[in-house]
Image (spheres, coloured by chain):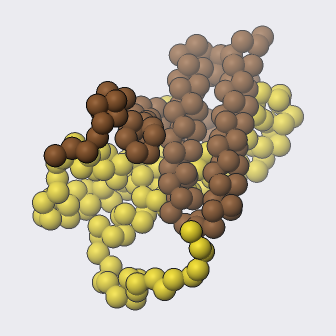
Amino acid sequence: MANTSRPLSPHLQVYRWKLHMALSILHRATGVALGFGTLLIAWWILATAAGPDAYNAFHALAGGIIGRLVLFGFTFALMLHLLNGIRHLFWDAGYGFELATVQKSGVAVVVLAAVFTVAIWIGGYYVAGKI
Amino acid sequence: MSMRTPLGKVRGLGSAKEGTEHWWMQRLTAIALVPLAIWFVVSLVALIDAGHATMVAWIQNPFTAALLVLFLGAGFYHLKLGAQVVIEDYVHAEGLKTASLIALTFACWLVALVSIIAVLKIAFGG
């Protein structure tokens, strides 16, 4: 097939942004972001396997405020992707296609993602005995 | 009126040659990752300030090591399937698309194996 550039039908300039559109592209965007975050996780595991020196070098970078912010962002991206993913699984099973339900489940995904992110961080700090 | 041949129906693979494998594996890994990812990220937050010895002790717990291997395996498979769709959607030049998909597959296998071997090395180490 020839790779001629064909014009794309305007969409971003045409359609008003709605929650379901935003969540759809966010599902993909968070997925890609999480993919890159997983590389950092691999680095963390490898640093641990390599020994205390490598681990401390990683920890010097990751344990500071920037590292915590990245981890917080990773947690939120994960919760958005996970909860919207469950929304997708319901659709796969055939449930929840009514417009009102799509809107409500979308709102639930955003709200619960924020709630779960905070809960996970409180839970993590609690498990570590910091609170 | 189905136009499929009897052999086609028996094999169940359809014109894409692998049936619904990609679709189902994406869902299966997604379901597995719901509890695994939540467990993992809670653990990560709990271990933010941990030293090397604490990390090693945590991974040497057999349950932790097993969950980590499962998380990494399912996670990288899910990642590969998802990124494959992204590449197929946005890269249209056939040569570049093929090269990207190959690079993605190889990279996922490599990083997954390295991470899993690292976990096992810690788990079985002294």
Residue A129 visible within the image: no
Q: Nearer the viewer, residue A33 or A71?
A: A33
Q: Work out which quarter of the rendered image holds the C terminus of chain B and state it.
A: top right
Q: Give x and y (percent) for residue B26.
A: 43, 41
Farthest right residue?
Answer: A53
The colour chain B appears in is: brown
Q: Nearer the viewer, residue A26 or B42?
A: A26
Residue A8 visible within the image: yes
- Is A57 rendered above or below residue A46? below
Q: Name which quarter of the figure residue A70 lies in.
A: bottom right
Q: Nearer the viewer, residue A42 or B61?
A: A42
- Write the residue at 84% across / 36% down: A54
Q: Nearer the viewer, residue A66 or B126?
A: B126
Spot the yellow chain and give its letter.
A
Q: Name which quarter of the figure residue A19 lies in.
A: bottom left
- Write the residue at 76% across / 13% down: B125
- Write the residue at 67% across / 27% down: B116
Is B78 displayed left or right of A38 in the figure?
left
Q: Give x and y (percent) for residue B67.
A: 53, 23
Is B23 displayed left or right of B87 in the figure?
left
- Write the residue at 37% across / 41% down: B14
Q: Give x and y (percent) for residue A63.
A: 69, 47
- Is B23 rendered above or below residue B90? above
Is A120 displayed left or right of A84 in the figure?
right
